[in-house]
Image (cartoon, helix red, strand yellow):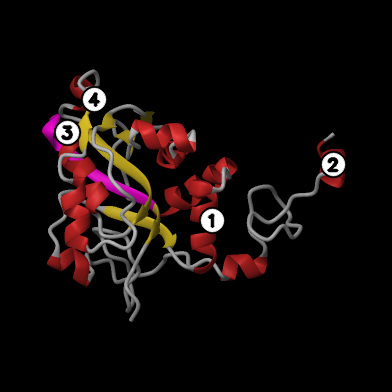
Amino acid sequence: MQTVLRIIYPSQCLTCGEMVEEDFALCGPCWRDTAFINGLTCDTCGVQLPGDDDGTQAQCDDCIRVARPWSRGAAAFMYRDNGRKLVLGLKHGDRTELAVPAAKWMCAVMPKLDPDTLVVPVPLHWMRFLKRRYNQAALLAKEVARLSDLTYLPDALHRTKSTKPLDGHSRDARFAMLDAAINANPKRAAQLEGRRVLLVDDVMTSGATLAAATEACRAAGADHIDVLVLARVAKDG
């Protein structure tokens, strides 16, 4: 039956539609145009760094300059070229099926976690959720939790303040806009207390959103917070 289905509905590349050998895969050219992160990376945000990975901890200039409230961070690929296309498809193009392969790529770079870690998505404000109909961070977090056999807590955090899109704003403006915008769900605060948390989002730019979510987890008593994103935006040069 599977062979017949493959003949009728052959597997296609996630971005260009060319035929590939398995579902949820990229063809060779699209794989090459996706800037997957490997080698030496920043331990705090996951951005790729020049040089060889010798096993020692490293930080990028941004994370040296801006204090991060979380402990460790990782990203699957850089937000450019085909990576940008994949993120936008998931976020704005109703390509919810992209969460399945995206979570696999994210788990491949995820730091080693304790088995009692809670997987928590960065929340959307309810007005934006109604408009978009889904939270892409929640789709990613659910798949990451499933693949890692970790507990998924989708409503641990609430976005209590509606903010304008952060694109085009400076780092300081982003942090100001996110101030007090995310809080722990009072009904879930007891589950966060004393627990390790993995925060999941689709993209990290300045880190303002992840910082606000981390502070909300800490306010509820979470003991240790790591972050995991699908894509990392980095400055050119």
Q: CA distance from mark 2 to mark 4?
A: 47 Å
Distance Cα–Cα, label 1 vs label 3: 32 Å
Q: Which mark is residue 3?
A: 2
Q: Is residue 110 visible?
A: no
Numbered tag placed on residue 116 in the rendering = none
Give how far apart the Cα atoms at labels 2 and 3 are: 48 Å
Could you tell me how many numbered marks the image carries?
Answer: 4
Which is more foreground, mark 4 or mark 3?
4
Q: Secondary structure at mark 1?
A: helix
Observer-side mark, 1 or 3, equals: 1
Query: What is the magenta range?
Result: 218-229
Q: Nearer the viewer, residue 19 or 39?
A: 19
> Where is residue 100, by image quadrant?
top right
Relative to 82, say whether 179 is above or below: above
Specify which label sits upstream in the sequence, 4 or 1: 1
In this view, 155 is above or below 44? above
Residue highlighted by disc 4: 185
Which disc, if any, is residue 86?
Answer: 1
**Element type where label 4 sits in the image:** loop
Q: Which residue is mark 3?
A: 222
Crowding at dot 3, Cα within 10 Å, few <14 / some 14-19 / many 20+, comes out as many
- Mark 2 or 3, which is nearer the eye? 3
